Image: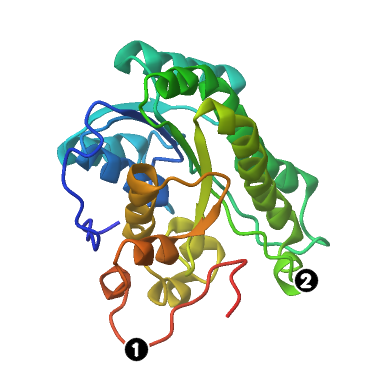
Amino acid sequence: MGDPVSTVGLTSGKLAGKTAIVTGASRGIGAAIAIRLAAEEANVTMIGRTATPHPKYQGTIHTAAARAEAAGGDVMPIVADVRDDKAMADAVQRTIDRFGGIDMLLNVAAVIEPAPVTTLTMNQYDYMQDINCRATLLMTKLCMPALQLSARAGRGPHVLNISPPLNMAAEQIGRFPGYTVSKYGASLLTIGIAHQFNDLGIAVNSLWPRTTIDTAAVRNKLGGEQVAATSRNVWVMADAALLVLTHSTCTGELLLDDEVLAAHGATDLDNYRVTPGTDPLTNDIFIDD
């Protein structure tokens, strides 16, 4: 993940006393967001499946939690699968028992199978749907009572999903249709749940990177070292997420990371490049040139 380079330079303590749940927190964007929230003195429950080192995927939920604790937060790592309803209900209850409530839910857990329809298996399709879309709905439902209590206490609760803008261009939808359905499903949930939660005072938004991000998914599924070299690092998403959680007043929006940063005066994003230089960055899936 590298060092947590920040362009926005927020003041430590912005989230002191607030509690977040972050899924997909063993590595990548999820781990980076959890570390950012911890640096702002948030309590953070980090949920991930990786308990022991994996040959292809660097880091575990325990190593990520150690980094978050070092950043300054009170952290509870939980080894669990977001497809497991009981395990997720237990994780939510453990969070409430330890920290007293929930103010933020970040649905980051995701998988991608970049396969055409002819070779995509139904098990792969179901796997993407269960993690990318179903788990987003499940976690939101499970956290809703605590988020409502947070709203009544004037704590500005927020659900943030990592899902894309709804680009209806055929070439975008047709690239990996099975994956597209699962991620667009999460974005539709953002819009629909935001509408239902609006009168409750709970914000629900989505965030997506304009460029590819140097993650295990990019390195192992979407182009390897070549694409990783023309990507931004995970901290661009972590900083954008932090700004949405601490400064945004919108709900039901499908946001892009660089637009969030630009709205807060951060327009020079060179610090987030994996490889310094003038080579053009690679656009992420669903983002037109």
Q: Identify residue for label 1.
A: 278
* Image coords of residue 116 (percent x, y): 76, 64
Q: Identify residue for label 2.
A: 170
Contact between labelled residues 1 and 2, with CB atoms less than 8 Å apart: no
* Image coords of residue 132 (percent x, y): 61, 44
Q: Which mark is residue 25?
A: none
Q: Is residue 181 visible?
A: yes
For the residues labelled 2 and 1, the Cα–Cα distance comes to 30 Å
Seen in the picture, residue 46 relative to 268 is either above or below; the reply is above
**Residue drawn at x 49%, y 77% as measured from the top left:** 282
**Residue drawn at x 34%, y 51% as measured from the top left:** 243
Q: Is residue 58 visible?
A: no
* Image coords of residue 156 (percent x, y): 39, 32
Seen in the picture, residue 288 relative to 122 is either above or below; the reply is below
The amino acid at mark 1 is Thr
Instruction: Classify 10 Å Cα crowding around label 2: few (below 14), some (14-19), many (20 and above).
Output: few
- State the SS at label 2: helix
Q: In the depicted view, which residue is nearer to us: 189 or 275? A: 189
Quadrant in the rendering for residue 127: top right
Seen in the picture, residue 147 relative to 276 is either above or below; the reply is above
